[in-house]
Amino acid sequence: MKKLLVAIAATLVSSWALAHNCPNEMKAIDAKLPSVQLSADNMTKVKGLRAQGEKLHKEGKHTESMAALAEAKKMLGM
């Protein structure tokens, strides 16, 4: 029983950590956007992924949010 409680607590803590990292990832993307040289098409994709990440974060879908933000960061060379 004790191991089960520890596992549940670890899951909750890791979810909480991811939930609070989404805004930091969005800030990093926002900071990089003005200085990066991308085609108009790629810039649109990056901004769309960033917006999708924010939407998913607000919906509580933090794993999906982090995936979208990671893709945007990859396109930005981060």
Image: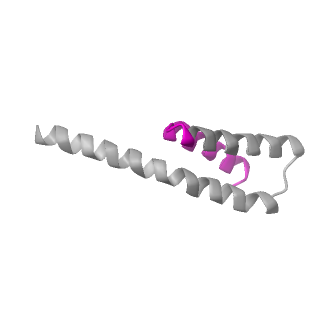
Magenta stretch? Answer: 57-78
Which of the 4 image quadrants contains residue 69? top right
Residue 69 lies in the magenta stretch: yes
Residue for point 65% across, 43% down: 71
On screen, residue 66 versus residue 43, left or right, reads left
Q: Residue furthest front?
A: 58
The percent position of residue 22, horizontal first and vertical second, equals: 55, 50
Q: Is residue 68 magenta?
A: yes
Residue furthest left as drawn:
1
Relative to residue 73, is residue 67 depicted above or below? above
Of 42 and 16, the residue lying toward us: 16
Q: What colouring style does the render use? A: one colour
* Residue 78 visible from this viewpoint: no
Q: Nearer the viewer, residue 42 or 60?
A: 60
**Magenta residues, dominant SS class:** helix
Q: Is residue 78 above or below residue 70?
A: below
Observer able to see residue 13: yes
Q: Position of residue 73 (x, y in %)?
A: 66, 50
Where does residue 44 sit, x and y in percent of width and height? 81, 42
Picture quarter with the N terminus? top left
- Relative placement, left or right, of 61 versus 52 is left
Point 18% across, 37% down: residue: 4
Q: Residue at x 48, y 53 (%)?
A: 20
Residue visible at 64% across and 58% down? 27
Q: Quadrant of the C terminus?
A: bottom right
Res. 7 image quadrant: top left
Could you say where residue 28 lies in the image, as x and y percent from the top left?
64, 59
Q: Please give left or right for residue 52 compared with residue 22 in the image.
A: right
When the figure is inspected, residue 57 is found, relative to residue 27, above or below; the finding is above
Q: How many marks?
A: 0
